[in-house]
Amino acid sequence: RIAYVNGRYLPHRHASVHVEDRGYQFADGVYEVCEVWNGRLVDQRRHLDRLERSLRELSIAAPMSRAALAGVLEEVVRRNGVRDGLVYLQVTRGVARRDHAFPPAGTRPSVVVTARRSDRRGQEALAAKGVAVITVPENRWPRVDIKSTSLLPNVLAKQQAKEVGAREAWFVDAEGNVTEGASTNAWIVTPQKKIVTRPAESGILRGITRTVVLEVAADLGYAVEERPFTVAEALKAAEAFITAATTVVMPVVRIDGHVVGEGIPGPIATSLRLKFHDFSE
Ligand code: PDD
């Protein structure tokens, strides 16, 4: 495997960053995960748009032009021979003597890009069965709209889920509303067959998969309500699912041990999953 690190393509096992990288010391960085499907980077434009926004919000300089970055992503995918998989891109504020405040002007951001194959059959098998989620109290900072590498609450929540055999943890805010998963956006389908997902304006990352799924839903003629929903409403839902570049649309069949709907992937989640790649760029 080959990784890109600050201008060089290196064997994956030798790819490393400096010990004083601010990503390592402060989680002072941002990232993107993009799906590779049939050799194509899915929704690359939107991922680069969101990366630029994350960088701007944190006043991290763009490490290179957008075209150059796109070129690196494609080169890493090519060099790793990835047809179906994921590409990971991380930009940190760079290497500098440890000091919480920003490093001197001119400090170069660090860029790392890796790619790996995914087990498409394993993913399809999982989607055919559906996954379990648990709920945990929301304990993240309010700027979850920035795709930052500061992910400790997400790490702890996901581990908690894993320990009880669940695939995802849904954060629940002080009002009892589900915000999103540790690494996915959260959705339900009401008994009246309305698709519900939280508005992207607060409490969640604006998922690229979420944006595309909204387009797919509109095309399939489904009613969609962008509004918060509670755990109680989710437990009574006909269907539930999660979305992210890593899972596309993944049906949820259990929440905190309670069966959702029929306990099998629902028709709406399944049709959104099937249609997804017709709509993604
Ligand atoms: N996670 N919400 C959170 C907190 C996420 O970390 C992610 C993505 C999403 C979905 O975003 P998108 O549809 O653009 O992938 C929502 C990536 C995949 C990860 O951390 O691995």
Image (cartoon, grey):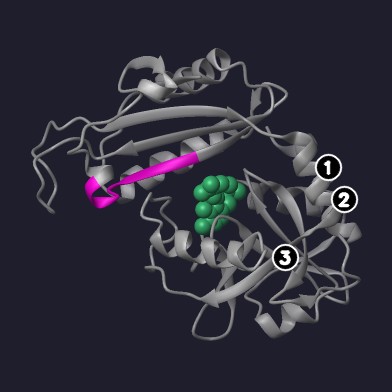
Residue 53 spot, x, y in % from top left: 40, 45
| Above or below, 68 relative to 271 | above
As drawn, 65 above or below 89: above
Classed neighbour count for the residue bearing mark 2: other residues with Cα under 10 Å, few (<14), some (14–19), many (≥20): some
* Residue on which disc 1 sits: 275
Q: Amino acid at mark 1?
A: Lys
Instruction: Name the mark nearer the viewer: 3 or 1.
Output: 3
Mark 3 / mark 1, whichever is N-terminal: 3
Dot 1 falls on a residue whose secondary structure is: helix
Q: Amino acid at mark 3?
A: Ala
In the figure, is residue 223 to the left or right of 225?
right
Q: CA distance from mark 3 to mark 1?
A: 23 Å
Residue denoted by label 2 = 271
In the rendered structure, which disc, 2 or 3, sits on the residue that comes first in sequence? 3
* Mark 3 closeness class: few <14, some 14–19, many ≥20 residues within 10 Å: many
Secondary structure at numbered mark 2: helix
Quadrant of the image occupied by residue 267: bottom right
Decide if residue 260 is in sight here: yes
C-alpha gap between disc 2 and disc 3: 19 Å
Residue at 37%, 68% (x, y): give it.
141
- 17, 190: nearer the viewer: 17
Eye-nearest disc, 2 or 3: 3
Specify the segment rendered in magenta: 25-32
